[in-house]
Amino acid sequence: MCGIVGIVSSQPVNQQIYDALSLLQHRGQDSTGIATAEGDTFHINKAKGQVREAYRTRDMRSLIGTMGLGHVRYATRGNAANEEEAQPFYVNAPYGIVLVHNGNLTNTRELTQELFHVDRRHLNTTSDTELLVNVLANELQSQVSGSELDPEQIFTAIARLHERVEGSYAAIALIAGHGLLAFRDPFGIRPLVLGRRAAGFVGDDWIVASESLVLESAGYELVRDLEPGEAVFIAMNGEMTSKQCATNPRLIPCSFEYVYLARPDSIMNGISVYEARLRLGDRLADTIAQYTPRGDIDVVMPIPDSSRPAAMQVAQKLGIEYREGFYKNRYVGRTFIMPGQAERKKSVKQKLNAMGSEFKGKNILIVDDSIVRGTTSKEIVQMAREAGANKVTFTSAAPPVRFPHVYGINMPTRHELIAHGRKIPEISTELGADYLIYQEVADMQAAILEGSNVSALEMSCFTGDYVTGTVTPEYLAWVEANQLS
């Protein structure tokens, strides 16, 4: 999971990209980078840490140009502590290309060998984004013989990229002296939206970003989501062209975007994240009513912030009082996307504080968006008991996470997942809860898709079914071995 943005504007883009990345900060806290294009020249600045920490006034002044892109990262592949792994990545031929990527490639071993032995391209890092930009560069180079480059050549290169690359990828690239390119994998697993803003006599400004809230904040009109497999090219003069570049595209977006990752004020693939979370609460309330004895719940409490809509609906539907019992320190990052187990555990009590007056002597129903490793959940149950709770019922608006996620979310190994190989009563014991209730898989899917034109979701971490059809047990074992080494 990362956040990406690209802008072609009639005005300097450095501040626009900075503001957009600030709004996408929830998608990654490890590192950030901005690249701008001044004619044929790129200006690039990237650093570890969050957006507000990474850029100084002198950095912003150096980011000259009216076309640019930006990235916020949390590591799913490569070394989170290594600044060289920060995006964007740059290659100098053909033309010069800088690229940012949200997703995770699943055939990195094969691509690495192909690039070295066939394409004669050298890699400096273990990042799959560096792989992606080199594949793009190689396919573009095979299309052109001189300095001229037209959109059809670009779209042919993307079609060939789709044939070579497996996994999830939403990407934005700058091609020096030509324009901005954005493309999405043939399954549309990771999000990418297109926006437009009138710019007077010069023409339209264009933006491509991970989430629609970025567009709204900057005064852009949401035009549409990029289609699975589609590529969009925006020339430096603002002329936009697009083409479907995949043979058999299918829209199967990641369910975890709606459960946890995206901000609630975003719309993805025509689905409001906030309304999807309200519907998750409605469905979860029915399951809670089925499995929890009446009178065993005095109050419903969310774990702020992403579970709040679901918790409100649970309380309303069950007719139980809704209370805010946990206070969130907003200056600590999201524990789910912190890279190490020890770091996640350390940060829980820094992030949340239980207010004793809301817990003492009460039977508490806690609603969280999901339970992945269980580290945070176990700490929260303990905090509720220490604050004086009589009974603690813990509920998840998502089903049990039992399988590795290989499409861009940091849950690659089975041993890290508390639900892997355990039945629900065993998980409840591990968490220290009196009761534990999960959302049903079918209810989650129905809640997210209700009223939309989307017919399927990527739910591999819940079901073990990998939509790309190329994820084998051998690959999962390889990923796990590399994570543990």
Image: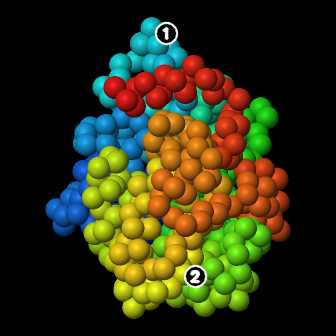
> What is the x, y in percent for residue 37?
37, 50
> How crowded is the residue under tag 1: few (<14 C-alpha within 10 Å), some, or many (20+)?
few
Q: Secondary structure at mark 2?
A: strand
Residue found at the very far top of the displayed protein? 117
Q: Nearer the viewer, residue 454 or 153?
A: 454
Q: Secondary structure at mark 1?
A: loop
Amino acid type for the residue under numbered disc 2? Val
Q: Position of residue 389 (x, y in %)?
A: 45, 80
Asked if residue 466 can be seen in this view, the reply is: yes
In the image, 161: left or right of 1? right
Q: Quadrant of residue 325?
A: bottom left
Q: Answer above or below: position of 311 versus 456.
A: below
Q: Position of residue 338 (x, y in %)?
A: 35, 53
Left or right: residue 96 versus residue 179 is left
Q: Nearer the viewer, residue 21 or 177?
A: 21
Residue 271: image quadrant is bottom right
Residue 140 or residue 230, whichever sits in front: 230
Horizontal side of residue 79 vs 419, given as left or right:
left
Q: If the image is split into quadrants, where does the C terminus sit?
A: top left
Residue occupied by mark 2: 300
Q: Position of residue 250 (x, y in %)?
A: 77, 42
Whether residue 133 can be seen here: no
